[in-house]
Amino acid sequence: MRNNSNDFNQIYATERRKINTILYNAVKNRQPSSLYKPAAYILHSDGKRLRPFLVLLSAKAVGGEFKSAYNAAAAVELLHNFTLVHDDIMDNADKRRGRLTLHKKYDHNTAILVGDSLLSVAYEYLLKDCNGNSKSILNSFTKGLEEICEGQSLDTEFEKRKKVSLEEYVEMIKKKTASMVKMCCEIGTFLGNGKPALVKALSDYGLNIGIAFQIQDDLLDITAKEEKFGKRIGGDLIEGKKTYLFIKAIEKSTGKEKQMLNKVIENKGIRINQVNKYKELYENLGVINDAKRAINSYTNKALKSIDAIKNKGNREILIWLADSLIKRTK
């Protein structure tokens, strides 16, 4: 598979450019400009476009073609950006992908409206590709949206609670993050007219990759380089978020270490100048390695599920993508 990495990178780069063109055109020349100019700002940011790429790969994995899924692929990215805009407002985040968040560049009201408009345009583009499986496609898309909102609500609830178990946290990220990845794979298989067994295989792949992706995001928040990550390092601790690493640290800590962690809950976060101290605490407790093991475990579950894909090339590019996600630095 290593010999194919350059080919896979080229496929990804080519399809990413195509998706970007569709996204840019989706809001181009629309009025009023007070709504769609800010929408263009968020869509022109340096997104990885992994979710639309998964739609395309899933369609092809079950015997379909990329060309049957481009608008649906753009639709899931529009949905994703809707969630990012609203998530940034709720978190009062300053930066996204290395640039000012929408509500910081414009204002809260504009950002809320832009997020809503991106969702409506997402449905418009999804319908362009709906075929004989329209009901299944729309059901998967809508169910994914419902679960994202439920996951975001749980995430907000957890910020107010003093204690959150690891099981509760994993259930939350299944909804908030993994449900969309799962949905992308499902929609792709429906567009490719995949058989039920392959729909299930790719759905499981997406779910487990999504969980691994979020735990990797938690890990990068404390271990990445800020210039690559595009966001403030230690932001989760500063905001008092209960991530995989934080919950694991609470479980494993005793004495003064547990007191330090409880202060994060009591004070609803830490100061910027305390980030390195808590990073050292995570290292001492071994939770950084725990997170890496969890990422590998969920990734392996994802890879096992796609054994059902008989075409070697289609299977290997999904393996390559999973490998790329757990090795990412931003």
Image (cartoon, rainbow, N blue to C red):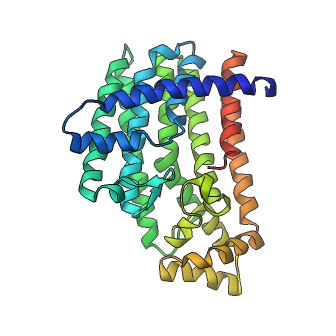
Residue drawn at x 51%, y 27% as measured from the top left: 17
The picture places residue 287, in percent across and down from the top left corner, at 71, 65
Residue drawn at x 43%, y 62% as measured from the top left: 93
The reply to whether residue 193 is in sight is no
Q: Is residue 186 above or below residue 250?
A: above
Count of residue discs: 0
The picture places residue 26, in percent across and down from the top left corner, at 33, 29
The picture places residue 197, in percent across and down from the top left corner, at 58, 22
Q: Which of 278 and 233 lies nearest the eye of the viewer?
A: 233
Residue drawn at x 61%, y 41% as measured from the top left: 208
Q: Is residue 205 above or below residue 287?
A: above
The reply to whether residue 293 is in sight is yes
Q: Is residue 62 above or below residue 76?
A: above
Q: Which of 243 and 93 lies nearest the eye of the viewer?
A: 93
Q: Where, by quadrant of the figure, is residue 244 drawn? A: bottom right
Left or right, 292 with reference to 41:
right
Q: Is residue 131 above or below residue 20?
A: above
Left or right, 262 with reference to 130:
right
Residue sticking out furthest to the left:
32
The picture places residue 278, in percent across and down from the top left corner, at 66, 75
Residue drawn at x 49%, y 70% as measured from the top left: 239
**Position of the N terminus by quadrant:** top right
Q: Where, by quadrant of the figure, is residue 54 drawn? A: top right
